[in-house]
Amino acid sequence: MQQREDFLLKAYELGIIKFGNFTLKSGIESPFYVDLRPLSSSPQLLKTLANNLLELVEKSPFELICGVPYAALPMGTTMSLASGIPLIIKRKENKGYGTKRMVEGVYADGQNCLLVEDVITSGQSLLETIDEIEREGLKVTDIVVVLDREQGGIQKLKAKGYTVHTLFTINEAVDILHKYHRLNDAELVRIKNFLNNPPAPPEIKRLALEQKKIKHPVGKRLIEIALKKQSNLIASADVITSAELLKLAEEVGPHIVALKLHMDIIQDFSFELIDALKKIAREKEFLLFEDRKFGDIGNTQELQFKEGIYKIASWADMITSHVIAGEESLKVFENVGVVAIVEMSSKGTLTDDFYITKALNVAENASNVMGAVAQRKISDDLLLFTPGVNISSAGDAKGQQYNTPERVCKNYHTDFIIVGRGIYQSADAAESAKEYQTKGWNAYLESLG
Ligand code: 5BU
């Protein structure tokens, strides 16, 4: 007991808990702030902490240790050095090419991995990490946490069958600091009051789509449709005849916010098709999204956008474009919402972290870009669109890789899911569009915590 208290007092001197007035990420005003990262500046304290944590999990059956990036990485490393149990490292970013392994180190299928976390709040980020680790074939049964902020995270993990070991709860930590006069009576009352009656986050934080700072009129319209229809589904209509396309548009129309098209795969293209599509889009309230994936110099893109057989500029509400030719090349897309391709879904794609950073920079600087295609949360200022979504398949034989709506909404914080074959190849397109709509929207609401 004394040893735990000593540890906490020394850690407090390092600045891991601060008292005052702080605005948390959720928008809540908190009387304290916790940040365990300064612990790495004291190797001695880090060792004491590692020993304390190892004691807590003495009887747990783990064969590997993994610290949740980044704050718990040094904690996991120190526990590994002290116990002789190997460490694995969970990537936060992926390399985007090659094996795309999210967990580095030597491990075998079915091995049990202990997760180490610094602070647990809602439990959401831990659940995301567990999901990534389990996808690599590893087993997670136990989690050890330094500080529990007592905001429901532990209950959430327990409900899913995980055993959580905690060194301190925030109430215990505050009591110890009060006992040793690091906190006066008035401060203690204020903090206990906050912990016993946690304020609800400001209402505006409820719907991520509503708070996105999207200025582009097409982006605003898309959000409006999503909120009205309770849908974040975009159906990808990769069929090859006008008749199939119109039938699909009618069937999925009520469930989608936009219909994504590859107009150049239609064998019998005509402007009658465009007129009929526009009519359905108006009636069923969705946008027309031409997935043209432009990728040339501005002048050529302008010709491809406005001229040729398809005259995309005359009917598309939204288009996709690569940003490989740079910012200037995007200026030619007038009166349309541009969705920049920042990261692709296919195996072996060249869109690694360096590409993503640079592509995002181009996208964010172009005023006609309203969103980006990517497989992860990338920006608060752009809408995020994620293709490669399918409930019943993990991929195809041509490099496509699939995730479920749950995974892309909860782990990648996607705004809009894009589903092609999952809908148009199903026996009943309307029914499966409805299923993807429900699954996508529920997962989106859950992702807001
Ligand atoms: P699918 O049938 O659900 O695999 O169709 C996915 C659609 O999304 C298809 O039209 C692709 O061209 C499009 N797509 C994609 O799958 N991955 C990407 O990275 C990009 C677009 Br960008």
Image: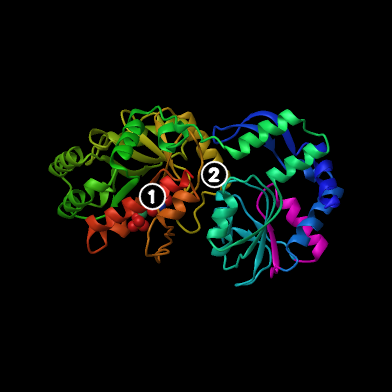
Q: Which residue is mark 2?
A: 355
Q: Amino acid at mark 1?
A: Asn
**Is residue 79 inside the magenta stretch?**
yes
Give the residue drawn at x 44%, y 29%.
213
Where is residue 121, by image quadrant?
top right
**Position of residue 207 measured from the top left corner of the image (x, y, whole percent):** 42, 37
Instruction: Choose between 373 and 422: the one closer to the eye.
Output: 422
Disc 1/disc 2 C-alpha distance (Å)? 32 Å
- Point 69% across, 70% down: residue: 61
Residue under the point 39% across and 29% down = 368
Q: Residues within 10 Å of mark 2 (few under 14, many from 20)?
A: some
User: Looking at this view, is 168 or 324 the one in front?
Assistant: 168
- For the residues carrying marks 1 and 2, which lies nearer the camera in this image? 1
**Relative to 204, 221 lies left or right:** left
Q: Residue 241: say if magenta.
A: no
Q: Is residue 386 above or below residue 330?
A: below
- Disc 1: residue Cβ within 8 A of ligand 1's nearest atom: no
Task: Check disc 2 and give the amino acid type.
Answer: Tyr
Q: Quadrant of residue 305?
A: top left
Q: As displayed, is residue 429 above or below residue 70?
A: below
- Chain part drawn in magenta: 60-85
